[in-house]
Image: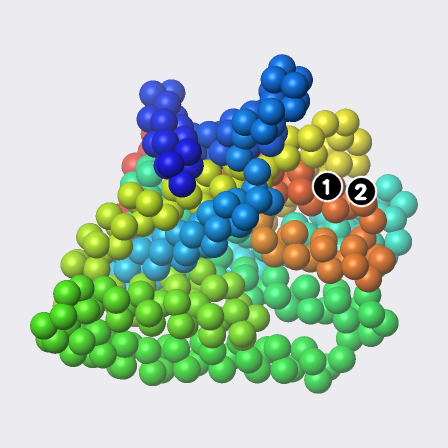
Amino acid sequence: MAAFLIAAKLGGALSARIGQPGVFGELMAGIAIGPSVAGWLSQRILGGAPLFIDPASPAGEFISTLADIGIILLLFLAGLSIDADEFKRSGRAAAIIAALGVVVAFMLGFGAASIFGWSSIEAAFAGGVLVATSVGITVRTLVDVNGLHTKVGMAILGAAVVDDVFGIIILSALVGLAYGGISPLSLAWILGLMGLFFLSLMLVGPRAIPRFITYADRFQVEEMALSVALALTFLIAALAEKARIAAITGAFLVGLILSKSPVAGSLRAKVSTMGYGLLIPLFFVEMGVRTDLRALAGASLLALAFLGMAIFGKVIGCGLGALLSGFGARDSLRVGVGMMPRGEVALVMATIGSRVGVVGPELYSMTVMVVLATSLITSPLVKLTFKGAPLEKA
């Protein structure tokens, strides 16, 4: 933990010196202390001495658990920091942005794989890998560049929530195809679970959660409101996973529900201190530690084309959705870049396809490369696109 925190803050400080968001420095610091750089140096120069962070060790797994808590706190804090009414008003734009981003990314991935002679089911998995956005890096970067409390920031967050639902539906359909067919009953079950989760949270949550925490705050127990808020966040994040929705989406929605409660300001200050002082940097450094730069070595022509589809699919698709929703050209580009990173859903899709014999080693390696490359380039590109023209505040 000492190594992770020192690396995080040094990386963030160096990143600020070169005009980049802190998250970029944390990712690069993780790469430096992990197997990709420190591990390589240990092998080549120090005769194999294990002077690097091993993510597969018991200590590495422990840090990984803390990092998962960190990303949940980051999304809870993001929800807590924005105006719920403004977020609701971005719903139509978010749906259009997410839908076009999903369609364009899927078609580009499917088309590229088909051109190189892959079977229809393999090409469908290739398209599916490119569908779902991983919003953690974008949220952290938006915070760093003061872009979270803008119409663009809320459009990205809303689109990421919708995008997560689309990604799970496509994943379920592809898994059904891989196993020999799609069961309408299983798809209806998944859609029903998702609908029940969102409906219950949106109907009951705004009435019950703020009152419950305000009531808990009356007790003369140290940090009672904070503990109850975090307990509810973890509980609803767990229920979101049971409903096939990302845990971070559940955490974000809890924060959004609490954003207008009397204790919102106090919670925001305390969670921010706890998160940015310890847990949130662990997540981004751990991402860097788990990054294997060898996935970029010897990339084939298809792999490079696939990476290009991953980058431009979201920029074009989500950017077009933003244009159709009334955003200007500059803000539409910002939305497209913000929706670019891929993460856990892409890896899950590739892993499941590999287990059933549909996804071969090449697509799995390409997926790892896409996750790695988009994670590294999103932060500086968001910083670049958010420079210059002023942002419309929400």
Label 2 sits on residue:
362
Quadrant hosting residue 263: bottom left
Identify the residue at horizontal 45%, vertical 60% (top origin).
Answer: 248
Residue density around tag 2, few if under 14, some if 14–19, many if 20 or more, within 10 Å: few
Question: Looking at the figure, which quarter contains the N terminus?
Answer: top left
| Residue 192 to residue 9: above or below | below
Horizontal placement of 234 versus 83: left or right?
Answer: right
Label 1 sits on residue:
366
Whole-percent x and y of residue 146?
Answer: 29, 41
| Residue 142 to residue 31: above or below | below
Quadrant hosting residue 268: bottom left
| Amino acid type assigned to the residue bearing label 2 in the image | Glu
Whole-percent x and y of residue 116?
Answer: 86, 41
Find the distance from the CA under tag 2 to the CA under tag 1: 6 Å
Residue 346 or residue 324, whichever sits in front: 346
| Secondary structure found at label 2 | helix
Q: Is there CB contact under 8 Å for labels 2 and 1?
A: yes
Residue 204 or residue 219, whichever sits in front: 219
